Amino acid sequence: MASNNPYIVAFFIQITYAGMSLMSKAAFASGMNTYIFLFYRQAAGTLVLVPLTLLLKGKEKRPLSLKHLCQIFVISLIGITLALDAYGVAINYTSATLGAAAFNCVPVTTFFFALILRMEKVKLNKAAGIAKVVGIMICMAGAAILAFYKGPYLSPILSHHQLFHHVQTQTQTHHPPTSQNTWMIGCFFLLVTSVSWGIWFVLQARFLKEYPHPMEFMCAQTVMSTAQTFVVAIAMERDPLEWKLGWNVRLYAVLYCGVLVIGVANNAQCWVIREKGPVFQAMTTPLNLMATIIGSLLLLSEGIYVGSIIGASLLVMSLYSVLWGKSKELVTAPNDQQPSPPLKQADESTCRSEVNSTLV
């Protein structure tokens, strides 16, 4: 049974992330401001992570210099504040399914920026290198189809109008799902999100080489992003009524994302990566998309466009193409290369980069 635990936990993680897209979409559809939502969820995550980090850290001192704090501020600004604000606007203007599809694009964009900064290499005379390039091209094609081709609309089979009537009404009032203009705006913000995350992972990898303590790094990023998102939210929305939380879908979404996603799923993902490696965790990413599609049909009564299915399928293909090329290079790497860093430190660095792909 113990050997199956990583598979069970990985499945739980992807279901949790699918729930994040669905809960966020429901909160936005009910009229909640996307910038206020992001601040509240980061604040909830801070309340979970700070005591957890202090508890697990114990009496061990791992000080952060002023230089480190400035670097973390910029990293969190790019990868959390900018990326998640753009992500919130994107799924507000498109769908939870399209937001989940963007996750499959992140490993590809990360590789692209690592290639530009010469942290990755491509050998076009080998199958692994060709697979990576093909993966990037497929990713670009999938993103273009998502943005410019909608195709026929597939209505949900089941509909719970009584349960989600207020959500559907708000959605139709604020952003009609058939509007091509709002759809393209949402796709543009998804592109901003994917690019921001790609840069974010590269910056994180460099930072963790100098400061190999992912738990403190994650906590510091969450705290700083809370302050950053508060500034953005107060600048974009000053109506006190918009800041109120009641016992409704808005509060549930904030608690879900802050506690279950940031506090539980991210750390669970860290354990899975430590047990099975980063490639295994990345291979389970399409489960997020599948669960989100099912959840959107059954819970949000949200249909899907044929273009979204085609584009999302291409993104999944691009993900596996890049992962296959990367894994092939690792298998065929010459034995005379320099030895890898100690297992614990290497796993921690990889774990931090992978954990942040889940919208801390």
Image (spheres, helix red, strand yellow):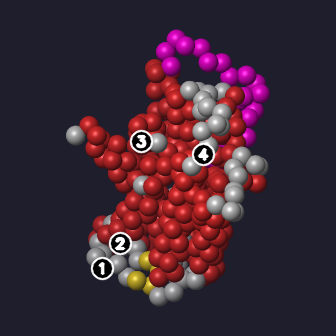
Q: Report the magenta residues as a range.
A: 57-81
Q: Quadrant of residue 261 in the image? A: top left
Classify 51 as above or below 313: above
Sequence-wise first label, 3 or 1: 1
Where residue 276 is drawn, which disc sits there? 3
Question: Who's the residue at 46% across and 67% down the image?
Answer: 97
Residue type (three-letter) at the residue carrying disc 1: Ile
Say which of marks 2 and 4 sits in front: 4
Question: Who's the residue at 52% across and 38% down the image?
Answer: 351
Q: Which residue is mark 4?
A: 333
Sequence-wise first label, 1 or 4: 1
Where residue 297 is drawn, which disc sits there? 2
Q: How many marks overall?
A: 4
Say which of marks 3 and 2 sits in front: 3
Query: Could you give the CA–CA distance between mark 3 and mark 1, rounded to whole angstroms?
Result: 37 Å
- Residue 201, position in %: x, y? 64, 46
Q: Nearer the viewer, residue 212 or 219?
A: 212
Residue type (three-letter) at the residue carrying disc 3: Lys
Sequence-wise first label, 3 or 2: 3
